[in-house]
Image: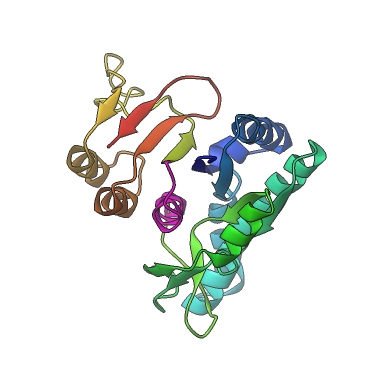
Amino acid sequence: MADLIVQKYGGSSLADAQRINSVARRIGRSKDEGNHVVVVVSAMGNTTDDLIQQANAVSKKPSEREMALLLSTGEIISCALVTMALRSLDYEAIGLSGGQAGIHTDSEYTRARILEVGPERILKELREDRIVVVAGFQGVTESMEVTTLGRGASDTTAVALAAGLNAKICEIYTDVEGIYTTDPRIVPEARLLKEIGYEEMMEMASYGAKMHPRSIELGAVYNIPIRVTSSFTDTPGTLIH
């Protein structure tokens, strides 16, 4: 039986058309290796910051409901473009919003927490042998209101889906080659870690390592191995387990 892999691509990996096409080829390679693939995407580059600026330009105090609706569009754009890129490479692929993918949250519009994952739609598409691309960072409430999960929370979407789908691994693709002992941009002698435990990683995330703490928490609770690696090179990265 084919393995199910969840992959997540951050904004820097999707910054322009060239990078989106490169990501699509990487996703395609995973599919060609015989895996079922679910992909979670962040907004392109600085899209979220640009949307916040636009909101502040038209309103002194934008409502949280409308902010969630606005900010969710960044990931929808990435989702649609990555799906188009995959289809242009002749892969069967479908894009889904967080709500369509079954991400159910509480009603804190811009700081929502995932209450449950209803993966029926994703499983249906996987049975049709499609690659499923999901807009990260968002979900819906019981009354179908759009919510967002807080900055950087596409990681959390990915790990939650990996848990809900019983995936073999969750792969987080970013602009660094993995988890370092400290920030390599500040400390040149920082070492790349081959592996790290959930607890240590949670501590590092609370001190500013580039991963959403909630995603590591979920990984630990559901025992989902998380690999953090670069979308620009072929390196093994760091395994959090």
**Nearer the observer, 126 or 77:** 126
Q: Main secondary structure of the magenta part?
A: helix
- Give the quarter of the image for residue 236: top left
Q: Residue at x 71, y 34 (%)?
A: 21
Q: Residue at x 35, y 28 (%)?
A: 238
**Nearer the observer, 82 or 53:** 82
Q: Is residue 153 above or below residue 18?
A: below
Report the magenta residues as a range.
153-168
- Which quadrant of the figure contains the C terminus? top left
Q: Residue at x 55, y 37 (%)?
A: 12
The x and y percentages for residue 23 are 63, 34
Membership of 158 in magenta stretch:
yes
- Decide if residue 74 is in sight here: no
The x and y percentages for residue 10 are 52, 42
Q: Is residue 183 above or below residue 75?
A: above
Question: How was this image coloured?
Answer: rainbow
Q: Is residue 230 above or below residue 156?
A: above
Q: Residue furthest top?
A: 189
Membership of 79 in magenta stretch:
no
**Nearer the observer, 123 or 174:** 123
- Give the quarter of the image for residue 231: top right
The x and y percentages for residue 140 are 51, 74
Horizontal side of residue 89 vs 201, given as left or right: right
- Decide if residue 58 is in sight here: yes
Q: Residue at x 57, y 71 (%)?
A: 69
**Nearer the observer, 126 or 48:** 126
Horizontal side of residue 63 vs 203, given as left or right: right
Q: Residue furthest bottom?
A: 143
